[in-house]
Amino acid sequence: MGKNPFLFLAGVLVCSFSVAVFASPETKVCSCPRNLELNCGGDHVTYANHCIRECHGVGLLHDGPCADQEDQGSSVNEPSEVADTTEQPSITPSGEEDRPPKDAPKERKRLRGCACTRELRLNCGVDGVTYSNHCVRKCERVKLLHEGPCRGGPGRTLFSQQDDESENDALEEEEQRLQSCPCPLNLMLNCGVDGVTYDNHCLRRCRRVELKHEGPCEADEQKQLPVQHGDNEIDVPERRIEDLKDCACPLILTPNCGTDRKTYPNNCVRECAGVKLLHEGPCEGDTEEIWDDQ
């Protein structure tokens, strides 16, 4: 794992060279080293090191974890869920105490001396908050709801749900949905409210786009028909589909040449464009080919 100048301490982002410890309002914010030196305080709480314990103003009972926590395998990475019975107000950025109303329900208490690694293992707590790893969640004394980030709205997660990973998930879901949306091959041009001309209503509905009007979109809203050349290369012609009416044509391939010296995929497409037949088969020479984009 590469060096990262930050780590989470019970949900608080701190410097990797020292950890910020927030004790009682009478105690200043302490900057403690990251060394692991488990010791038991006079309040029978195991602290990550002596600095963190002293920052809370707690005397030393003995070195090593408290006896009642040894069997639980307590460590700074997997803190035991021991209640902090000392009710302390938090300090707002303005320096004022932020105390809950007297009639408000009692909130969970964060575990003391809870130093966590910077391992990134997103998980969702039963409180609907996404935590950076299990240690951070356990420090808040919150049970696991499921692995991975919560799927909540803004304000319910520690991490924005509008990140790249979420966008990629949405794109994958959209692609899977479209693949599971079979549509007929009939041609019934219609314009969606997104300004795109769809081959038929089914294809538009699969994109969850409302109908703007029947027929192709007007002017700069129109979608171009691709052109297929003899060498099988496809590009987009300058000619737009306003020349085509709202026709339902089969997708059979019977090339024919119109009097406009353009090759059409079948007679229906040519007649739909209002062009008469010059001869069956593709036009000879360097002529444009009108190709259906289905």
Image (spheres, rainbow, N blue to C red):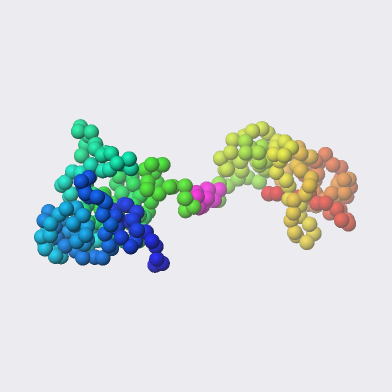
Residue 41: image quadrant is bottom left
Residue 18 versus residue 175 in the image, above or below = below
* Residue at 33 percent of width and 62 percent of height: 17
Q: What main secondary structure does the magenta stretch of the protein show?
A: helix
Residue 37 relative to residue 192: left or right: left
The residue positioned 24% from the left and 36% from the top of the image is 100
| Region rendered in magenta | 167-178
Q: Is residue 176 magenta?
A: yes
Left or right: residue 254 compared with residue 201: right
Where, quadrant-wise, is the N terminus in this rendering? bottom left
Residue 75: percent from left, percent from top: 22, 62
**138, above or below 273, in the image:** below
Question: Compared with residue 245, is residue 39 higher up or lower down, i.e. above or below?
Answer: below
Q: Could you tell whether 54 is left or right of 196 in the image?
A: left
Q: Quadrant of residue 245?
A: top right
Residue 253 seen in this snapshot: no
